[in-house]
């Protein structure tokens, strides 16, 4: 059985080329496949391999004080869903193109169990209505989403701030919980939207994957899109073999030290505050990103 892990951490990294060589050498020696992104703002990874190899790699990574206690989302599959191992240097580990420094302090978070309880009871512990904000792209949301979540059918993550601010009245006085696949986008989004004056925005700790891992999956509808050969996982985190959008599984975003992929850059046009009846084109996005 193959173990698939996803993890990220916003932490200042200055020794990127050396760190890339070290992590690539260690992962390759253990026979792991997948993607590791490194940027000045932190690390984002999605790897697959045997239980022993994954545990060995994570133990070595966590021995670095910058990654100590790194939380991981885990799922199983019969086959390795990646064709190769890549360790890449990027400008951002998740591209927002906005002045936010997530390593300077985390956004407030709600864990999976607490969010389920809030959704079960219809409000948070302060009695506020809970508004779930989907920070993912349109093709991901088509595969599955939380019931009743706000979904702007975003063409790219960079369009999120404009879409939310154009619709800000919806969120006033409510408990806003941003969510994404593994936590990285909703954390960055929560910080930036709070800076823009939306108020307190909570992130779903560990994203959808952690919610499905730690709860019975209630309030979730459909499957969860993942950026690898599995295409998507169901509520039990089992592969569904959903066909991926155009492009091979990998990583989205501009590189600090490598040539561009040749794919068109994501659009920066604002998303409509009303969910579109039709998804925006997938060209240029493909499966080029991690959660």
Image: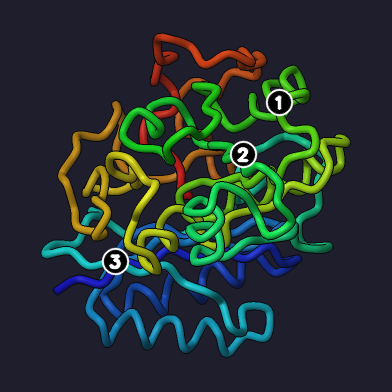
Secondary element type, mark 2: strand
Give the x, y percent position of residue 123. 62, 49
Seen at 60% across and 51% down, the residue is 93
Q: Is mark 1 on a helix, strand or loop?
A: helix
Q: In this view, does 261 lie to the left or right of 2?
A: right
Q: In which quarter of the image is residue 173?
A: top right
Q: How crowded is mark 1: few (under 14 residues within 10 Å), some or many (20 or more)?
A: few
Q: Mark 3 points at which residue?
A: 75
x then y, percent, for residue 281: 41, 14
| Residue 257 in view here | no
What whole-number distance in Å separates the C-alpha atoms at marks 1 and 3? 35 Å
Q: How crowded is mark 3: few (under 14 residues within 10 Å), some or many (20 or more)?
A: some
Residue nearest the observer in this picture, 240 or 115: 115
Relative to residue 220, is residue 147 depicted above or below?
above
Residue 46: image quadrant is bottom left
Please tell me which of labels 2 and 3 falls first in the chain. Answer: 3
**Residue under label 1:** 170
Q: Which of marks 2 and 1 is nearer the N terminus?
A: 2
Label 2 and label 1: CA atoms lie apart by 9 Å
Label 2 CA crowd tier, 10 Å (few <14, some 14–19, many 20+)? some
The residue pinned by badge 2 equals: 131
**Residue placed most toward the observer, 135 or 259:** 135
Nearer-N-terminus badge (1/3): 3
Tag 3's secondary structure? strand
Disc 2, disc 1: CB below 8 Å?
yes
Compared with 65, 250 (above or below) is above
């Amino acid at each position: 059985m193959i173990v698939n892990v996803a993890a990220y951490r916003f932490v200042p990294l200055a020794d990127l080329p050396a760190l890339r060589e070290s992590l690539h050498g260690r992962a390759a020696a253990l026979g792991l496949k997948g993607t590791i992104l490194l940027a000045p703002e932190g690390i984002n990874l999605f790897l697959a391999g045997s239980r022993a190899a994954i545990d060995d790699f994570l133990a070595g990574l966590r021995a670095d004080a910058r990654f100590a206690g790194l939380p991981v989302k885990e799922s199983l599959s019969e086959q390795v869903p990646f064709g190769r191992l890549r360790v890449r240097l990027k400008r951002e580990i998740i591209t927002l193109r906005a002045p936010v420094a997530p390593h300077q302090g985390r956004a407030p978070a709600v864990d999976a169990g607490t969010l389920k309880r809030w959704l079960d009871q219809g409000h948070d512990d302060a009695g506020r209505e809970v508004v779930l904000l989907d920070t993912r792209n349109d093709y991901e949301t088509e595969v599955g989403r939380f019931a009743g979540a706000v979904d702007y059918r975003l063409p790219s993550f960079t369009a999120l701030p404009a879409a939310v601010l154009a619709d800000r009245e919806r969120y006033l006085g409510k408990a806003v919980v941003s969510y994404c696949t593994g936590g990285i986008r909703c954390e960055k989004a929560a910080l930036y939207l709070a800076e823009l004056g939306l108020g307190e925005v909570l992130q779903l700790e560990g994203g959808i994957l952690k919610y499905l891992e730690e709860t019975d999956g209630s309030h979730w509808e459909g499957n969860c899109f993942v950026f690898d050969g599995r295409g998507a996982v169901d509520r039990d985190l089992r592969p569904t073999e959903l066909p991926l959008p155009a492009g091979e599984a990998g990583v989205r975003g501009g590189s600090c030290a490598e040539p561009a992929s040749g794919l068109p850059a994501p659009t920066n046009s604002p998303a409509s505050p009303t969910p579109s009846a039709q998804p925006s084109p997938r060209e240029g996005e493909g499966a080029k990103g991690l959660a």
